[in-house]
Image (cartoon, rainbow, N blue to C red):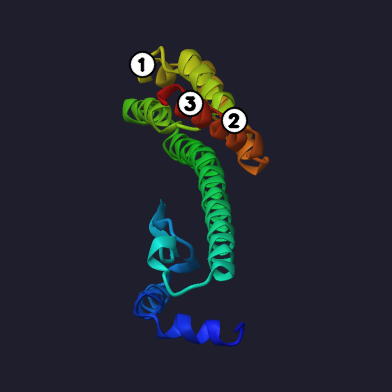
Amino acid sequence: TGEENPKKMEENPFFREAGRKGKRRQAQGGTLFTGVFGTLSFRRCHEVRTFQVMAPDVPQAVLIDADNQRELLRVREEAAIKARQEIESSCREFIGECVASLREQTVKLCEEMLATIRSSGSVHQKTLNRLLRFIEQFRALNFTNDKEMEQQLEQVKQEFLGRPAEQYRDSRYFRGKLVEGLTALRETARDLSRQDATPLVESFGQLGQRRFHLAA
């Protein structure tokens, strides 16, 4: 009967073991789903989100009648859909945070360079080298293809990093131009960091899908 089925599932050793494992994973901060797709995990920055999807294969559920087998398949499908939605949401959030973080780092660098120039009244080569290294690192980390921010950095590189620090120290005009350029870059990066990164996130997802299909 319908009232006896839950009891049978509780008495089944497979379900008892699945329940114990699920409780242990929940105690460790994981998220538990019931289904038959194994364990899916997604590493996001310093945290690990675990999606547990576990249930017996239909051939193993020999004590479950046809109605319960259909219900088991339905629950399994719903669990898989929910797990996929959780993973996609985490991916979108992670990518958006990466875009904003790189732009915010640009703001911070400009502020520190401007503070150094103002406090010393001069321009040192190590200050210019620091900006050059940052631009190179930005390119290496720009997996989201943030073209707008990268183009802004490239423009600054072409305009201000082609001359040595001595020319900035010896020329108030060039020094003033450098300050103006860094100020403009800071404001642009700040505006971009406050913008909605959804277009970049969606573009990154579409690129991943194209690469997946090409690999397949």
Task: Tell me the amino acid under the disc marked 1.
Answer: Pro
Q: Which circle, 2 or 1, is nearer the viewer?
A: 2
- Quadrant assignment, res 190: top right
User: Is residue 29 visible from the viewing direction of this image?
Assistant: yes
Distance from the alpha carbon under mark 3 to that under mark 2: 16 Å
Task: Tell me the amino acid under the disc marked 2.
Answer: Ser
Q: Which circle, 3 or 1, is nearer the viewer?
A: 3
> Going from the N terminus, do you reach mark 3 or mark 2 first?
2
Mark 3 is surrounded, within 10 Å at the Cα level, by few (under 14), some (14 to 19) or many (20 or more) other residues, namely: few
> Going from the N terminus, do you reach mark 2 or mark 1 first?
1
Foreground residue among 91 and 94? 91
Query: Which label sits on residue 213?
Result: 3
Mark 2 is surrounded, within 10 Å at the Cα level, by few (under 14), some (14 to 19) or many (20 or more) other residues, namely: few
Q: Residue 130, image x and y in percent?
A: 36, 31
Distance from the alpha carbon under mark 3 to that under mark 1: 48 Å
Distance from the alpha carbon under mark 2 to that under mark 1: 38 Å
Q: Residue 54, image x and y in percent?
A: 42, 64
Residue labelled with disc 2 = 203
Residue labelled with disc 1 = 164
Disc 2, SS: helix
- Quadrant assignment, res 117: top left
Q: Which circle, 3 or 2, is nearer the viewer?
A: 3
Quarter of the figure with the N terminus: bottom right
Q: Are marks 3 and 2 in contact (CB under 8 Å)?
A: no
> Going from the N terminus, do you reach mark 3 or mark 1 first?
1
37 w.r.t. 188: above or below: below
